[in-house]
Amino acid sequence: MRGQKQHKSTVSARIINIATTAVAIGIAAILIAISTSQGLQKEIQKKTSVFNGHILVTLFENNESQVSLLPMIDSDSIRNQIKEEINIEKIHSVALKAGMLKTDSDFEGILFKGVSENFDWTSLSSFKTQGTFPSFDSQLTSDEILISEVIASRLNLKLGDRVEAFFQNSTEQGIPTRRRFTIVGIYFSGFPDVDENLVYGDLKQVQRLNKWNSNQIGGYELFVSNFKNLKQTANNIYDKLPSDLNSIPITERFYGIFQWISLFDFNVLIILIVMLLVGVINMATALLVLILERSRMIGLLKALGANNFLIQRIFLYNGALIMAKGLFWGNIIGLGFYFSQYCFGWITLDPETYFVGVAPVSISFTEVLGLNIFFLVISVLLLWIPSKIILNIVPSKVLRFR
């Protein structure tokens, strides 16, 4: 039937065009929703993880504070216990201290993050906009720091500038300790909580400010290779640690953010269900019109000995061809959006709300193929119901009149 060109004036031809368009719009909308949802989820997850680690190992007393209040011992035995977990990719020793950067005309509160000479700066390479990363020595204390574009703009600072920083000696009131730092690099994450506060410097600076020993740190930041197993990995590490240490996955430290981005999956599911229903309803309508328009042909086939199952398969085959045409054009539209946004980034977002300036997109070939197969199979299975009308067509009635 589909091999013969439908006349443009027939009812079925117009209905089929509408059904094809509905399927195309449906699959395109789903592809766009999945690619933007996954892209935003991965980008926010990446930014949050790069600047905070996937898992934080620290003392229980430090759990509720971003600042390293009490030190823990950086020991090889604890490191080896953590490295036994196969999902662990990197481990960094860190310590954080609240402070203030001050110029002649202004000041800005900061969170000074001390890292060791073994810190892997490559994870921050895509965020660095100017200069280089700080260089640390295993013996000497470095005064080089990496600050954000936001802090640099607010304090009117640039590469090579010397800036004063003030840190409280202890929880008791007293004269703050002053340090002078050299700005060697500037970064921009697009994440307000990071850009407005975080400054990278030498771990030994925090140790000196807190009067800690060289083997005392605030905690370990761990990075995993498979984020899907994050919670299980954190639990496994917790079981191996001493009783005074805790293992906190980033999904718990930034619970609100990860709960928010998890809602994207629910939104995509709603879009998938709605678009699938729209496509199936339009296809069912087209199939019913096609069956009613071809009732004489069905009666003739029955009179010649064709059974109902064979005739149903003929119409379902035609329905699948109509569906495939809609899927083809829908994929063209959906993937066209994906590649254009991936290459040119023409859709922008408010960083204050979405933590990114350009809408990121992400989807794999497997996901595209699986979605098309799922859409096609479910639709054809559901079309079996309206095709049951063929059972009620009696040859003696439909062939009675010419």
Image: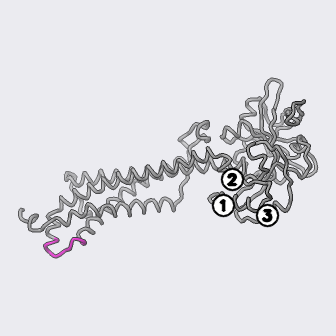
Q: Report how far apart the C-alphas of labels 1 and 3 lie in the structure.
A: 16 Å
Tell me which segment is drawn in magenta: 301-310
User: As drawn, which residue projects farthest toward the top?
Assistant: 105
Asked if the stretch drawn in magenta spans residue 41, the answer is: no
> Which residue type carries mark 2?
Pro
Judged from the image, the secondary structure of the residue bearing numbered disc 2 is strand
Residue 116: give x, y in percent of width and height.
84, 50
Pick the residue in front: 350 or 81. Answer: 81
Residue 101: give x, y in percent of width and height.
81, 32
Pick the residue in front: 284 or 9. Answer: 284
Badge 3 vs badge 2, beta-carbon distance below 8 Å? no
Q: Earlier in the sequence, mark 3 or mark 2?
A: 3
**Which label number is shown at residue 249?**
2
Asked if the stretch drawn in magenta spans residue 304, the answer is: yes
Is residue 242 rendered to the left or right of residue 354? right
- Residue at image point 75% right, 33% down: 152
Q: Quadrant of the C terminus?
A: bottom left
